[in-house]
Amino acid sequence: MKLCSALGVWMFFNVAAAMEPISTSIAVGMAAALTGFLASYPNLIYYFHECCRPEWISLNKTHLEVALNKELFGQHVASRVVLKTVTGYMQNPNPKKPLVLSLHGWTGTGKNLMSQLIAESIYHKGMESGFVHLFTATAHFQHQKHLETYKEQLQMWVKGNVTKCPRSMFIFDEMDKMQPGLIDSIKPYLDYYDNLDGVSYRQAIFIFLSNAGGEKIAEVALNFWNAGQEREEIELKDLEMAITLSVFNNKQSGFWHATLIDKHLVDVYVPFLPLEQKHVVQCGLAEMVARKMKPDKEVVERMAQDLNYFPKEHRLFATQGCKVISSRLDYYI
Ligand SMILES: Nc1ncnc2c1ncn2[C@@H]1O[C@H](COP(=O)(O)OP(=O)(O)OP(=O)(O)O)[C@@H](O)[C@H]1O
Ligand SMILES: *[C@@H]1O[C@H](CO)[C@@H](O)[C@H](O)[C@H]1NC(C)=O
Ligand SMILES: *[C@@H]1O[C@H](CO)[C@@H](O)[C@H](O)[C@H]1NC(C)=O
Ligand SMILES: [Mg+2]
């Protein structure tokens, strides 16, 4: 039995009360007490089974804004774009198509973290939610010879899950390593259709992650630096072209076959800038806090100093972003 709300819990106890005459008075008492209890502590329902209902799924804009500000370092463009797009979409009672975000950038710059923050601001259980689905190219769709099977499977999964809960989220990691053709199978779901076979996909959220365009984005960031401009002056329009061009020209990879771009199925391309040493330091301090240690700037700076940066002559951007921080830190504390 699925207990989908306080009402469900209340009914369960009432039915139980009706079916068990001897302990009826006890059960009725319990039902009444529980009803009163849940009324005073509405958060208690969150301990029960997750359901496709607003109690479990609704955007908390403040939560997203605070999380982006506090937890995602050095990504002012991505933060701004995501906050605006996700909020706009979630507040629209009648979206014309599902939300499709494509996150691009150098390794270790926070793309997975961003998808996690989005999930946490919408689903009470965050990435643990049964309505959030993460697919990784190398893990789920590894073998070239099984492409046809994968296509069918993916179609079935997306359709099945959206049927179960229209407000489902699908995250596709490592898009650049995905076989061309695989994403074609779900392309109709991303489009402007009222419904397909009786299923509407307009409430669903698709997030694609990839490194495609990362080098071009780094180039733009380097040009700003060379021109003596602040990183914070970089705007979305400075980077959009860099992404679409490199995605467009990469015939090898995943969904990028022009059709997605041609048909404007991606709502926004979200660029992730390469991280500088000061951001790596921020990551290190945050990691120490997460480990319940006293943040030690001296330790973290020593670690950040020893990492690799590019271009070699300026040591400007961290080659692995913040990716190796949690394992590296062990050597310095
Ligand atoms: N901008 C950032 N702010 C805070 N933490 C970050 C940032 N970028 C990366 N991290 C941290 O570094 C680790 C790796 O980040 P994440 O997995 O999000 O990178 P990614 O962009 O998905 O990289 P890849 O392209 O290699 O998959 C995580 O622990 C994450 O918390
Ligand atoms: C939304 O998030 C903010 C910040 O995390 C939190 O203080 C607030 O209680 C949340 N609101 C709801 C309705 O959950
Ligand atoms: C939903 O997706 C998951 C993969 O995340 C899959 O295992 C499951 O079978 C899908 N559910 C339905 C009803 O299709
Ligand atoms: Mg990643």
Image (cartoon, grey):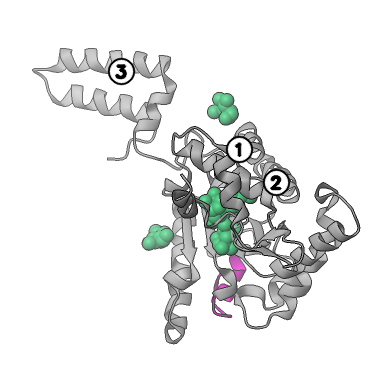
Nearer to us of marks 2 and 3 is 2
Mark 1: amino acid: Ala
Q: Position of residue 51 (x, y in %)?
A: 41, 41
Residue nearer the viewer, 319 or 53: 319
Which residue occupies the extreme right position in the image? 227
Mark 2: amino acid: Ser
The tag earlier along the polypeptide, 2 or 3, is 3
Residue located beneath label 1 in the image? 67
Residue located beneath label 3 in the image? 34
Q: Tell me whether the residue at label 3 lies in contact with that at label 1, contact meaning CB atoms closer than 8 angstroms.
A: no
Residue 199, visible in the rendered structure:
no
Q: Tell me whether the residue at label 1 lies in contact with that at label 2, contact meaning CB atoms closer than 8 angstroms.
A: no
Q: Position of residue 80 (x, y in %)?
A: 74, 45
Determine which quarter of the picture holds residue 1.
Answer: top left
Cα distance, mark 2 to mark 3?
42 Å
**What's the residue at 19%, 18% (across, down)?**
27
